[in-house]
Each structure stands twice: as structure tokens, then as C-alpha cells.
Amino acid sequence: MSEELQVDKNSGCYHYDKLENPMIKVIDYEKGTKGKLEINSNILLMVTKGSGKISFRKFVNKPVENGDILLLPIHTALQFKVEEDATILTFRLQPSIYFCDHFSLEALFERQEKREKKRFIALKINQRITSYIKSLVPCLLDGLNCQYFLDLKMRELFFILRAYNTKWDLAAFFSPMMTENADFYAFVLANYKSVRTVGEFAQKARYSVTGFEKRFRKVFGISAHTWLKEQLAAGLFHEITCTRKSFTEISAMFGFSSSAHLSNFCRMNFGVSPSTIRKKGTEDLERDE
């Protein structure tokens, strides 16, 4: 029995992943395909079919094949050639990796031998990850791109990797992204709700604005201004659709000078007014009852 995804009800939600740069995606390549890519986020890549060769940083024409799991670090220029029809899964990673509360990859990385950082490390797709892929891919192909769902699937993947690989293999695999950036990432997540501007954020972090922007873009792959705006939009959308707070209350909560200012922000970022967003959210809830 096939299942039908209610995309018409959900795809308008702000929390649906933006398809320009999805958190998780499936890509098919035909034999003979060649290309160059600029990697703007840390990417975990799984080869679920086919084979080919890749070149990045100091690794040239490294063979990759069905069953390989690779890490492509941020700011990497990648070249590839597909030797057999291939299917890959890509996972866009956050700068800090959390497997569980009892396992700190950063702490382990500090003890890793320097020579480990220079090796080309590939993990392997095992039986458990194969089962994980079989449940994930149909949902992606159906269009189930909810950010909450994708975040849960990312966390599930990390738990599986932790359970079926040694700590040392994981430290070696993730070493290209295990730097002081993890501390900066944690600082941003802990403090972004208490600032309104990039200038305030830079001051709180004890950086110049230019230095903060440079560090932020290195870690997150986008400007601090754009990232803050995205977090504001996500939080705002949630309050409008999931609470009964007045627009005056919501305006004050998010630092808008007036309800009119809030309305302008919504029209610019969502294409409609706050009342239209709330009305649609209410209609979707009633339709599901």
C-alpha cells in the first residue's frame, strides 16, 4: 500500500527545508559525468551506488565506490568523475558534531596524533546504515523536507555512527572540521537570541565587526546578518502560527518598533501579512482535525 504525503498542507510551512541548499538530499549521476564544486558547508557524503574518483585539497583522483562514507570540509574545491552510474546522499553538517552527552568528539580530537589529520579517511556503510538509508530516501523522494524531521534523521545518523565505529575512527574521520570553530559555534547558539544586530553580537564576542563577520562566515558559510535574519524569521513564524499572542505582543518580543514594522517584515520575507500567515496556519490545523 503506497502512502501519500500531504505536501499541499505542509510545504508552505516556513520550517520546510529550502531546496536551494537542503540539509539532506539524494543526487543521481550518470556514468562519465565530470564536474567541479565549491563546498560551502561541511558535507558528509554517502555513495549508495556506483563509483568514481574525486580530487580535493591534497588528495588527487581518490577512488570512491558504493558503500563509502566521506567528509568534504567547508571551503573545499572538489573535482569529480563518475565511472559508473552513481547515487549519493549528502548531509549538510553543522560546525559542531554531537553524538551523545557522554561523548565529546572535540575532546578526543585534542588527543589525536597529528599524522591522523593528514590521512584520507572513509567510513563504510554497514547493515544498520543501509536500513537507515532505506527508510530515509523514500521520504526525501516524497518531498518530506520538514526541518524538524531532517534534524531528527541527522541525529539518528550520528547515534548510528557512534554505535558502530570506534571513537578513534570517528575522530580521524571528522578531524578536518574539528577545530576551535566548535567553540565559536556553541557561543553563537547560546547568545544569538540576546542580540539584535551583528554589531551587538561582535561586541559580545569581543571581536571587531569585520573580524566577527569573517569568523562567522568561515564557520556557518553565510553572513552573520543573513543568519540572524533567518533565525528571526523562523522564530517569528512559529509565534504567529503556533500561539494566540497578539501581533503587538509578538512585535515587542522580537524587537519591532510597531505592528506595522512586523507586518512589513512578514511581507518582505514570507510574501504575506501576519494575519494571512495566522489564518493559513489555523486553516491547516482545522483541516487536519
Image (cartoon, rainbow, N blue to C red):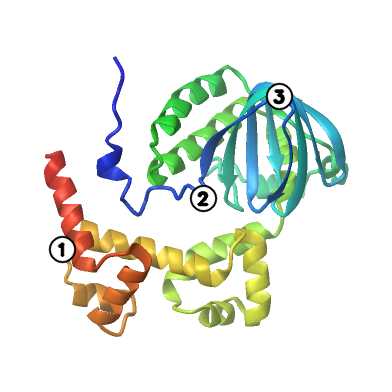
Percent x, y of residue 85? 67, 22
**Closer to the eye: label 3 or 2:** 3
Quarter-of-image position of residue 119: top right
Q: Tag on residue 244? A: 1
81 or 40: which is nearer to us? 81
Residue of label 3: 31
At x 60%, y 51%, the residue is 96
Q: Where residue 243 appears, x then y in whole percent?
A: 19, 60
Residue 20's mark? Answer: 2
Q: Are marks 3 and 1 in contact (CB under 8 Å)?
A: no
Q: Is residue 197 above or below residue 217?
A: below
Are the residues tagged 3 and 2 within 8 Å (C-beta)?
no
Dot 2 amino acid type? Glu
Distance, label 3 to label 2, CA atoms, is 25 Å
Q: Quadrant of the N terminus?
A: top left
The residue lying at 23 percent from left, 67 percent from top is 274
Between tags 3 and 1, which lies in front? 3
Q: Looking at the image, is mark 3 or mark 1 earlier in the sequence?
A: 3
Amino acid type for the residue under numbered disc 3: Lys
Residue type, label 1? Arg
Disc nearer the start of the sequence (1/2) = 2
- Would residue 27 be visible to someone looking at this image? yes
| Circle nearer the N terminus (3, 2) | 2
